[in-house]
Image (cartoon, rainbow, N blue to C red):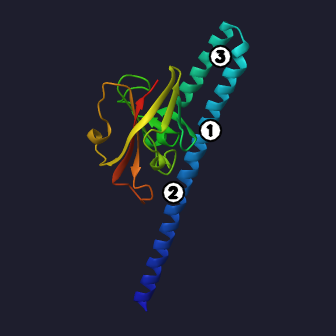
Amino acid sequence: MKKDKITYTAAIAIFIISILIIGYASYEIIYSKRKVNKNIEILNNIEKNKSIRSTNSNNQNNNESEKDKDIYNKHGIIGKLTIERSKKTLPVVEGTSDENLKSGAGHYKGSYLPGESGNCVIFGHRDGVFSNLDEVKINDIITVETDKGKFIYKVIDTKITEPKEEEIIKNYNEPMLTLVTCYPFGYVGAAPQRFIVIAQLQR
């Protein structure tokens, strides 16, 4: 009888822990989506402001451009990334900490910036901004826009690798873009591999 009671108590404890884990994971996903949507809203407002002020004087335009930069800096946004196939436009933030990646796709600080001659590496969560990254095909177009301009990349490769820096962050002598997320996509817990999209700058 005592053994049955212990078994019952253990089962209840496991059930409660499972509910708490699922609840926390759900909260994290919802929290991340809200932060990403907020940053998308910021990007959209900046685009609207650019359209509105296209008829203003140069001085006004310069002042408004500085305001845009201040907004970007305040939220850690460095630009936006559009994946043509999924029709997703995502905010790109500076840094790849867990908090950064809850706000959008994260630019790896040790890599080049979009458009520069080298490898621009951008990370994203597989259950968040890069949930459809495995749908990307060779020759697909990925666009990155920053205050430096609009950069159009064409996908030249996709692959699955081990989570080692040397496997992910390759050195290139030309402008390249590498998108990285965890793999497998449906894996529960810390995924053992990485899914990578490699793209080359077209213009």
**Farthest front residue?**
139
Residue 64 spot, x, y in % from top left = 65, 16
Crowd tier of the residue under label 2, counting other residues whose Cα lies within 10 Å: few below 14, some 14–19, many 20 or above: few
On the rendered structure, is 129 left or right of 138?
A: right
Residue 62 spot, x, y in % from top left = 62, 11
Question: Decide: marks 2, 1 in contact (CB < 8 A)?
Answer: no
Mark 3, residue position: 64
**Farthest left residue?**
166
Residue 76 spot, x, y in % from top left = 51, 30
On the rendered structure, is 8 left or right of 67?
A: left
| Quadrant housing residue 178 | top left
128 or 156, nearer to the observer:
156
Crowd tier of the residue under label 3, counting other residues whose Cα lies within 10 Å: few below 14, some 14–19, many 20 or above: some
* Chain-order first, disc 2 or disc 1: 2
Mark 2, residue position: 25
Q: Residue at x 62, y 38 (%)?
A: 38
Q: Residue at x 65, y 26 (%)?
A: 47
> In 3D space, how far apart are the residues under numbered discs 1 and 3 (Cα atoms)?
20 Å
Report the mark closest to the observer, 2 or 3.
Answer: 3
Q: Is residue 126 at all visible to an observer of this figure? A: yes
Please tell me how many numbered marks the rendered image carries.
3
On the rendered structure, is 150 left or right of 113?
A: right
Q: Residue at x 29, y 40 (%)?
A: 165
Q: Is residue 95 at all visible to an observer of this figure? A: no
Q: Which mark is residue 38?
A: 1
**Farthest bottom residue?**
1
> In 3D space, how far apart are the residues under numbered discs 2 and 3 (Cα atoms)?
40 Å
